[in-house]
Image (cartoon, rainbow, N blue to C red):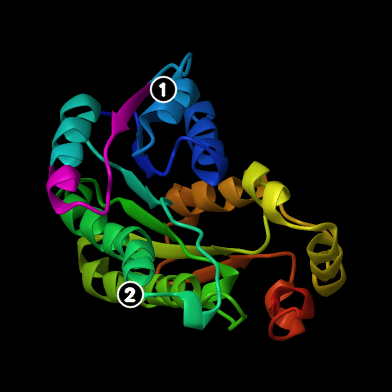
Amino acid sequence: MDEQTAIVTGAARGIGLATTKLFLAEGRRVAMVDRDGDELSKASAGLERAIALNFDISDPHQVKQMVSEAEADLGQVDALVNNAGVADFGPIESTDFQRWREVMATNLDGVFLCSQALTPALKKTRGAIVNIASISGLRASTLRVAYGTSKAAVIHLTQQYAAELGEFGIRVNCVAPGPVRTKLAMAVHTQDIIDAYHDAIPLNRYGSEDEIAHVITFLCSSKASYVSGQVIAADGGFESTGIGLPSLRT
């Protein structure tokens, strides 16, 4: 098959949906995976060459079924974007074990499960994996004990996979977004937090979903054919400016 394909998890909204649309614009066929069936149906409506797969990637049994259906429809898998994630923030003392496990199950376990399940298919195509971490996985901050730790683990997992799968021609990279102007972020960020981010980020603004998606699709493309095991912080320079924000400490 000459037509390239991709599987994108967490594809019903935000960065995942933006990435899906860029892949489609490139001529790829895309399997859109999300556990929110209603939002997935809305997001995939009218998107030619896209299929909607309603699965929870934190569940090993559902991952196995998702992979089976995706391969049956796509025929081959050239790229996997592990984007699905849970954004859960709160003080350490109020993060009980159940809350911790809910974050880890999607943000870390899901990346491992999908990557492992799709490794045989990616070996056949000498394909690419891109994992979506976060600036919170590169630098400590407050209220992110579970989220930040899960994303730091995704970064290391990326390097583990790159080291082991490189001999099969599989490239594995990671994108660590900084603050992104999503609907969810704008709904929960106070003006004080928005102003603080703008002050702390050298580019003085949030990123857009499309800006992150362009980095992801580049890493999945032949233009990045010699790039593997890398973490790209698409963050407007935020990583360079220090640790934490006063507005996020209470």
Span colored in magenta: 50-64
For label 1, the residue is: 41
Residue at the image point whose x is 68% and y is 53% from the top: 188
Quadrant containing the N terminus is top left
Circle 2 crowding by C-alpha within 10 Å: few under 14, some 14–19, many from 20: few
- Amino acid tagged 2: Phe
Where residue 169 sits: x, y (%)? 26, 60
Residue at the image point whose x is 39% and y is 20% from the top: 49
| Quadrant of res 146 | bottom left
For label 2, the residue is: 97
Q: Nearer the viewer, residue 31 or 162?
A: 31
- Amino acid tagged 1: Ser
Residue at the image point whose x is 54% and y is 27% from the top: 25
> Which residue is the extreme one toward the top?
46
Residue at the image point whose x is 41% and y is 22% from the top: 41
| Quadrant of res 119 | bottom left
Circle 1 crowding by C-alpha within 10 Å: few under 14, some 14–19, many from 20: some
User: 161 above or below 73?
Assistant: below
Q: Which mark is residue 125?
A: none
In this rendering, does residue 170 appear at all? no
Q: For this view, does 190 lie left or right of residue 221?
A: right
Q: Nearer the viewer, residue 133 or 4?
A: 133
Where residue 174 sits: x, y (%)? 46, 64
Cα separation, mark 1 vs mark 2, equals: 32 Å
